[in-house]
Every structure is written in structure tokens, then in C-alpha cells.
Amino acid sequence: MPKIVAGVDSSTQSVKVVLRDADSGELIASTSRPHPDGTEVNPLEWTKALDSALDELGKYEISAISIGGQQHGMVALDKEGVVIRDALLWNDTRSDKAAHQLNSEIPDIHERTGSQLVASFTASKVRWLADNEKANAERVAAIALPHDWLSWQLCGAHNLNSLFTDRSDASGTGYFDSVKNEYCRDIFATALRSQRDVILPKIIAPNSFGGETTKGIPIAAGAGDNAGAALGLGAGVGDLVISLGTSGTAFAVSSTSTHDPSGEVAGFADATGNFLPLACTLNAAKIFNTVATTLGISFEEFSSLALNAPAGAEGLRIIPHFDGERTPNRPQARGLFSGITHSNFTKANIARAAIEGVVAGMVYATYAVEKLGVSYSRVLLIGGAAKNPAVQQIAADFFGKVIHIPPTGEYVADGAAKQAAWALTGKENPPQWSVGEVKEISPSSQSEEVVASYMELIKA
């Protein structure tokens, strides 16, 4: 009887669980549950959702499980392991001022952790807590991330010292050195404005188990969402992954660490021992939904309209910073329509410009990664918006390269499942599961001038 592994993706919007054959990677079953909306959430809601999903799959005998989760979220725990306040998620920008403070107080933070801080990072949220909720800050006995929290809950959540994580997710805290694979305790103390001993999850090797569930199922280290996706895709050194979901991310697998003083690129670690320099935008697929709804059309009509408009939308430009922006780091920014004329302000051009604006943001993010000396030879496009034909073609046109589109899948959850299977074997390298047939989209138009005009508007 084949061994079955479970992979979990606890994302901003929902939890997804996949069950796969540990040897072949064949999908056996999957399910999902929604998460509450908002930028701060009671972590117990994540636990309820995961428990419900696992209960549905209870007829299967699971040999190992691993949790992939949204990065950065701050779960503050007191000495009894009780959640002190709702978790602040990655997309909560109230900690922007705190990020600037810490960057000023620790000028070499990017050299030590790989990243300048922005509002998303856990360290920024720890400083916000210290300055705005002093009573809560004084109760802090441990800080966990969403995936750490869920792994700990599966273990029974009895002892704070049993919290564990992996280097990929720890690298998004702003107080972890992914080259030395150790916490920068002084940075954390500076963020909390306290020298007292606070428990941080221990770092587990990517092919190891950190604990077991109350039913005796071993739990692998887990990973941050982007590292999980890279592992699920089988991405290796030389691959650039563009992911278009709630947020947009451009990340490359690299054998060397990056240290960007500008703060545009986060020097994350991956889930295998390599590095994952990443630039993130706050605005991606949600822009398409908003524009389609405003135009009163379906998502399919939105895509068709965009493909019927000429490249460059006859000069119409949309800078899609509707929710502020992270790359470039402008949390208070807002969206911008530019170049409007009586003749070009049509539904088709608006649809085209919305997609071009989002893709241009990913090109900008990729340029930021390239400036650090990171090269790539293959571009992979994933995420919910990757299914849109107009997004596919415009991405190929704007990058000027063949775009590789794997089948639609839950790659974060798949990466977690692959990690669980890897830990079962204890081998040096993860299993090589097929993702299926990869579609290729070639450029159809020359878009250098359009891309250049977007770069100028984004920089302005």
C-alpha cells in the first residue's frame, strides 16, 4: 500500500490540503476551507479551517504532513501559549513607520538578514506592537509565524519550546541570518525594545521532522509560501517564477544570497538550502477582478477585450497601486490612470491597460532582482491569474521571452507534500515529481517602448 503524505497551504484567503503518493507524487485527494478576510486575524480561525479540512480527509492513512504558509504574519504568544492579540498579516501596512525606524537604527540590517525591512516583515510588526500596544508587548513570551503556529497546534500546543520552523519562513522575519542559519537576537530585542528572553521557533532542516501530531503523524519543517511553491514546481537555480495571486511575486532560485540596500528585493532562503531573492507587489489578480466588475463584464470577457486592444492600449496606462505598494515601497500610494484621451478611453483599452500595468509591475520587480546579479534562463508563470490568456500573452510580450506555464495547481501545498515525502526518505535531495505538461507562450509583439513607459511611471 503506497504511503500518503499531506501538504498544506495556509494562505491569506484559505487553507488548501493535498494528499499525494509519497513515491510518485500522484494526487490522491484535496480539499480547502476559507479564511476570514482582513489584515489581522485570530489564528484560531486558521486552526479551525485546517482541522475541518483534515477531518474531511480522515479516511486516508497519512504517513507525514507539512505546512506551507503565508510569510511574515506575527503570532504573539504569552507564557501559557495563549494568543495575545489577533495576528498581523503580511498585508497589514500599519507597521510601515516601524520598518523605517528599524532600518535607521540598524543600518546594516540588509547585510545581516538579506533584506531591508518593509511593513510586511515580522520585525516591523514586533516594533509596532512595542510602540502601540505596550501591555501586549510586555506579555510576549514567544513569536511564531502562521505556518509555525499551525505545526505547533497539530503537535498539541503544550510547550512553547516545541515551536519549530524552517529557514525559508524564518528568512522573512527580518531577524534571521539565512547564511549562518541563525536568529539575530539583538535585532529582535531592538524591535521589541526589550532584552528579555523570548522564544523563537527552532530551525529544522528541510528534510527533517520537527514533531508529530496528537495522532502520531510526523510533521516536517514546513516552509514559507513562495519557497513552498518553488519546491512544488521543482524550480532550480536559473529559474524565475512569476506568481500572480492576491499579491504578485517575482522570485529566482539562486545558489548565493542577496543583500539589497534599497529594500526592493528580499533576500529570502528557499526550502532546499539555496536562496530565493524575491520582490513582491501588493497588487495583482485583485486588480483584474475590480476592473472587470467596474466595467460590468465577466472575467472571460475581460480577457477577450484585453486581447482585442492593441499593445500599449493606444497610450492608456494604469499604475495599479490600488492598495498602496511594496515594490516600489510606497504603502500610501494609490492607483493612477495616465494618458487618457477621448479616443483611447474604451473598455478594451482599460482591460488591456489593467493587465499591462500589473505585468509591468512584475517586470519592475524582476529588474530589481537582476540588479543584484541574479540571472535566469527560464520564466515560469503561476497563480490564479496565470490561467488568463491575455495575462499569458502580455507576460510573454513584456518579458520578451517564452513564458512557461505549468498546469494549474496548488503548488504551495504540493511543495509541502513533497517536503513531507522528502523527510520520510531522509535523502539529500527532494523527490522529483512531475508537474505535468508545461505550456509555452512566445512573444507576439514588440513591447519594449510600452514597458519603458511603464518603468518611468512606476519610478516617478
Image (tube, rainbow, N blue to C red):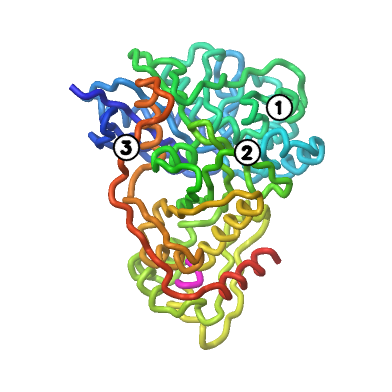
Q: In this view, does 117 lie above or below 302?
A: above
Q: How far apart are marks 2 and 1 (CA)?
A: 21 Å
Task: State left or right for residue 164 relative to residue 32.
Answer: right
Q: In this view, does 138 lie above or below 333?
A: above
Seen at 54% across and 32% down, the residue is: 169
Q: Name the residue under label 3.
A: 433
Q: Which amino acid does label 1 sit on?
A: Phe
Q: Which of marks 1 and 3 is nearer the N terminus?
A: 1
Residue 36 is at least partly visible in this image? no
* Percent of width and height locating residue 47: 42, 28
- SS of the residue at dot 3? loop
Q: Nearer the viewer, mark 2 or mark 1?
A: 2
* Percent of width and height locating residue 193: 77, 26
Q: Mark 2 points at which residue?
A: 257
Q: Earlier in the sequence, mark 2 or mark 1?
A: 1
Q: Which amino acid does label 2 sit on?
A: Ser
Q: Nearer the viewer, mark 1 or mark 3?
A: 3
Q: In this view, does 376 lie above or below 123?
A: below
Q: How far apart are marks 3 and 2 (CA)?
A: 26 Å
Q: Give the range drawn in magenta.
A: 351-355
- The mark total stands at 3
Q: Which residue lies furthest to the bottom in this view?
A: 343
Q: Name the residue under label 1.
A: 188
Q: What residue type is labelled 3?
A: Trp
- SS of the residue at dot 2? loop
- SS of the residue at dot 1? helix
